[in-house]
Image: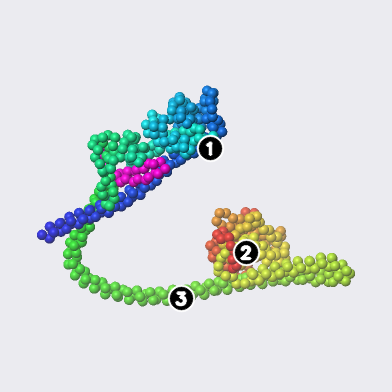
Amino acid sequence: MRRLATAVLLTAACAAGAWIASRVAERIALQDLHHRANAALDLHTANLDGALDKFRMLGPLIAKRTDVVDYFRGDRSPEETAEADLMLGRLAGMSGVETIAFAELNGEVFASSDPAGATGRTVNIPDVRDDFVAALQGRLGRYHDAEDDTGAGYHFAAPVRDGTIVIGAVLVRASLDTVEQAWALTPDPVLASDADGFVVLANRYWWQGMTLHRDTDPGNQQSVLRLRSKDRAGTSAVTLAEGDKSPGEFIEHVKPLPLLGWTLHVFAGTGPVDRAMTSAAVIAALASLTLALAGWLVLERRRQLIARVRLERAAALRLERRVRDRTAALTAANTSLAREIGEHQATEKQLRQAQADLVQAAKLAALGQMSAALAHEFNQPLAAIRSNADNAGMLIDRDRAADAKENLGRIAGMVDRMARLGRNLKTFARRPGDRTSPVPLRTVIGEVVMLMSARTGKSGTEVAVDMPDEEIMVEAGPVRLQQVLVNLVTNALDACEGRNDTRITISATRDDEFATISVADTGPGIDAEILGQVFDPFFTTKAAGVGLGLGLSIAYNIVRDFNGTLVARNREDGGAVFEVRLPLARRTETAAE
């Protein structure tokens, strides 16, 4: 009994879900159908208006021409008539209209772009040529015909005036075939009807000439289109029938065209709505059945699980006790690990501080090594300043102000040189920060050459700089990068000490992502056995007491902090070369260290 009740409930749930889903899908599909039909209605309206509007002013423009007005005055010779036919033929060919004709007040056509078919005809007013009547009244006339052998067409008639008097009319006929061809690409029925329901245009060619009737049954007349309305989900739907045949059910959208006196109809078929309802009902029924079966399975499993829960509850209690014990052990282990991490971080901080102190000590040691040469570098300009100052005083006493001014200019230049050297020494000696920023290599290398100029001049070593014309910006710290290059130049000077014709070359190149700075010397080079140890801390080949062996190690670590590399190798023609490879700067702005 329980299973029967369950089956009944499942069937009712599936039926209810399918019905609700089909109703919702119907409303959604009808809304989409309305949007699509409105868009098609606007498109076809614009197509029809555009096809006729481009020919509307052609007749008035032709009627204003002086040579056209002359054709309507008095008698015309056969040559003038032939000339008028030729002119109208050219105008029709250039504008794209079907025919252009000249008609006198009595309706006789005396010239046409198609003289074989139109010249000599008379526009009879009883033949519903409202366009010609309007033109005789001085207005732009319009007229539609659907019975011409060439197909449906639209006529414009413009008055020809001699001063203020109407003396004739220019008749323009535009073919509507292009409109019908554009409508033929639309699968849904499209038609235009006049005020009497007469079908003027349609994308079903056999509908032209038929008449629309709503909610009537005129029998089996083949010239009638019957529209029967019905309500569908709050929307008015129509059944479109032609004679005994019924193309189906549609949603009708209409738009009045008051200028033409027509009404445009777009019939959107409800086939997609029916298919959407069927699909939604099937999907909803399957979903409801699936959910119902899933619910039944859940209930069956629940009965099976109730018995298993009692067994698992006891196992859970035992597991809970084990977890509690393990948690206590893990908590103790985490506490111990946190303490060790704290100690490791404190040690790492102390190591970094020690490294920074070693870097600063190495810089001060380098300044100490350069002190004697720097003293000479300062004493020489000071002596020159004293000499130029004395000479300037003597020249002033002798009224030689121009020569004295020249001496004072030399003094100012030497003072500037000493100031630049002092600034570079101050920058080099200060403790650097940890941040990196875009650094111009030309500036850093120039400052290093100036700092080392005293020692290189004293030792007689030539320093050459090879830089490209374009500035190279690298991501580094300016003070720390300067220290790296000072260490490398200092090592090169130590290697060249006691040798003749020594030379140090500093060069810089770049590729897509990195820049390479090379410091090459003409010294004895590096022994192959120790080439892999030159960057180890406290490794040195100098005599005891001369150095600690930290310069290259400090330089190596600084370059590594810049995400770069520092390598050493021997040159083929003798000497050693150290290459610093640094990433190019990604930002254009510069920042102080």
Assign the N terminus to one quadrant of the image.
bottom left
> Taking 25 as reference, is 357 left or right?
right
Front residue of this view, candidates 149 and 369: 149
Q: CA distance from mark 2 to mark 3?
A: 35 Å
Crowding around mark 1 (Cα neighbors within 10 Å: few <14, some 14 to 19, many 20+) is few
Give the farthest residue toward the top. Answer: 78
Q: Tell me what residue is drawn at x 34 percent, y 43 percent.
A: 266
Front residue of this view, candidates 402 and 165: 165
Q: Position of residue 389 (x, y in %)?
A: 81, 71
Residue placed under numbered mark 3 in the picture:
343
Front residue of this view, candidates 273 and 61: 61
Front residue of this view, candidates 494 and 307: 307
- 538 lies above or below 223: below
Q: Position of residue 554 (x, y in %)?
A: 57, 67
Q: How many marks?
A: 3
The disc at residue 485 is: 2
Q: CA distance from mark 1 to mark 2?
A: 99 Å
Per the image, label 3 sits on a secondary structure element best described as helix
- 151 lies above or below 529: above
Q: Earlier in the sequence, mark 1 or mark 3?
A: 1
Q: Tell me what residue is drawn at x 58 percent, y 62 percent.
A: 589
Per the image, label 2 sits on a secondary structure element best described as helix
Q: Tell me what residue is drawn at x 54 percent, y 29 percent.
A: 73
In the image, which residues are magenta?
A: 244-270
Residue placed under numbered mark 1 in the picture:
164
Q: Tell me what residue is drawn at x 39 percent, y 32 percent.
A: 126
Q: Nearer the viewer, mark 1 or mark 2?
A: 1
The disc at residue 413 is: none
Q: Position of residue 8 (x, y in %)?
A: 15, 57
> Taking 380 as reference, is 39 left or right?
left
Q: CA distance from mark 1 to mark 3?
A: 110 Å
Per the image, label 1 sits on a secondary structure element best described as loop
